[in-house]
Amino acid sequence: MDALLLWRIQFGFVISFHILFPAFTIGLASWLAFVEWRWLRTRDTLWRDLFFFWTKIFAVSFGMGVVSGIVMSFQFGTNWATLSEQAGSILGPLLSYEVLTAFFLEATFLGVMLFGWGRVSEKMHFLATCMVALGTLFSTFWIISANSWMQTPAGYQIVTGADGMRIFEPASWWAIIFNPSFPYRLTHMVLAAFITTCFVIGGVGASYLLRGVHIEAGRRMLKAAMIFAAITVPTQVLVGDQHGLNALKHQPIKVAAMEGHWEHMPKGEGVPLVLFAVPNEGAERKDFEIALPRLGSVILTHTLDGEIEPLKSVPASERPPVKPVFYAFRVMVGLGTMMLLLVLASLWAWWRGRIFESRAVLTGWRVMMLSGFVALLAGWYVVEIGRQPYVIYGLLRTADAVSPVIAAASVMTSLIVYASVYAIVFGAGIWYLRRLVVQGPHPHEPPPHTERGEKTPARPLSAADETVAPTGEGA
């Protein structure tokens, strides 16, 4: 394993951890805004209890997301110095805009949301919650814009630096930000974050109902999750279809890898939909293939005999690794299909008045509780591995973007350190989140009045600073 592969594994490892927590907090912040709105409208204390319950989970998740994000930002300088030097004039401002809009907005209102209950007016507190939710969406906007530009670069010009290195400089910020794939990626990512959070909330509610605890809270969470999933999951299917058409136009070889499509099909036969196969990259074929004729053309091109560019249309050095892209795409689509079926079954049970009594539906929500995280990672792997061998698609190869003169042994050592520290820190954080979920919501007691000299907590994790009683029951 050379240094390049190890750098890629290390960055993939770090970003895989990082993407889970921001995605969860994107959806969770909007959920908190909804729950607080319901409390203000109804004055039902259960909504208030749910708000404080999920606020604790948000605080821990937000803290872990910040920690993992800081580590990732350092890697751009240490691991990918050439990328930073060549594309820093574009990527640097985009990431700075995230700080100026999202982080400043969140930093301003996060403390009010977490610690301001009873210390500011109800309307001010609700505004703070909404601003935190808006800040998470601003963050998504700029991060996806930067990533989308690397996938479908636009609005740039290439100049030659003093040392002869190619430098990407902005020619049109409008074209850079709103590059060809950006609208599809942004919508797809935001919906994925909402769906991920939705299935966690619904799964927690279903778990309470199956265990016979927090019955009313479980019903409200499950009902809200089911209604929201009934809107977002079908919408995600439509958005994913448009995203695929966009990828077919701008990154056809990525789509070919997703389908394991090596050869041109005979004229008029169309492209089959591959349900299962084992890609054989050495022989450039698929083994043990199970496929439905023409259905691939219908999905990919919206015609019966449409063709897509095969992998063999470019040299092997221009192709991404086929197996991880092929399998990750099927994991994502398979989980999405299971989500859709669960939503339909839930709506049927609700129509029959048995949504809270159907053990099959409740078990389905409980089993699928973490499915959004898996689908999110699988989709991210399709996007990132599928653009290889380029880090800026068609312009800068990954092998040319890595920091020079770094020994593979040093990279391996840092990878082991990262994995060990992450296992301890995030293992403890996830364990604590699980204990909070198992304990469940409880009646909220107003915070004591701040005495002279007493300080309000200043760290997000303080919002979840309480003893969690041990229990043998799982969530």
Image: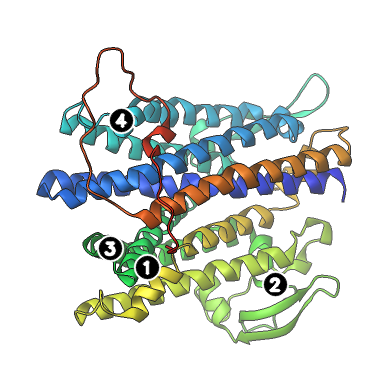
- Mark nearest the camera among 1 and 4 is 4
- Mark nearest the camera among 1 and 2 is 1
Residue at which label 2 appears: 260
**Amino acid of disc 4:** Phe
Point out the tag, 1 or 4, that comes first from the N-terminus: 4
Q: In this image, 11 relative to 97: left or right?
A: right
How many angstroms separate mark 2 from mark 4 (CA)? Answer: 52 Å
Tell me the colour scheme of the image.
rainbow
Decide if residue 234 is in sight here.
yes
* CA neighbours of label 3 inside 10 A, class few (<14), some (14 to 19), many (20+): many
Q: Nearer the viewer, residue 229 or 304?
A: 229
Which residue is depicted at the point 80% across and 49% down?
Answer: 5
Which residue is depicted at the point 34% across and 36% down?
Answer: 132
- Mark nearest the camera among 3 and 2 is 3
How many angstroms separate mark 1 from mark 2 (CA)? Answer: 26 Å
Q: Secondary structure at mark 4?
A: helix
Residue at which label 1 appears: 234
* CA neighbours of label 1 inside 10 A, class few (<14), some (14 to 19), many (20+): some
Q: Nearer the viewer, residue 237 or 345?
A: 345
Q: Secondary structure at mark 2?
A: loop
Point out the tag, 3 or 2, that comes first from the N-terminus: 3
How many angstroms separate mark 3 from mark 2 (CA)? Answer: 43 Å
Residue at which label 4 appears: 115
Q: Secondary structure at mark 1?
A: helix
Point out the tag, 2 or 4, that comes first from the N-terminus: 4
Point out the tag, 3 or 4, that comes first from the N-terminus: 4
Are discs 3 and 4 less than 8 Å apart at CB? no
Are discs 1 and 4 less than 8 Å apart at CB? no
How many angstroms separate mark 3 from mark 4 (CA)? Answer: 26 Å
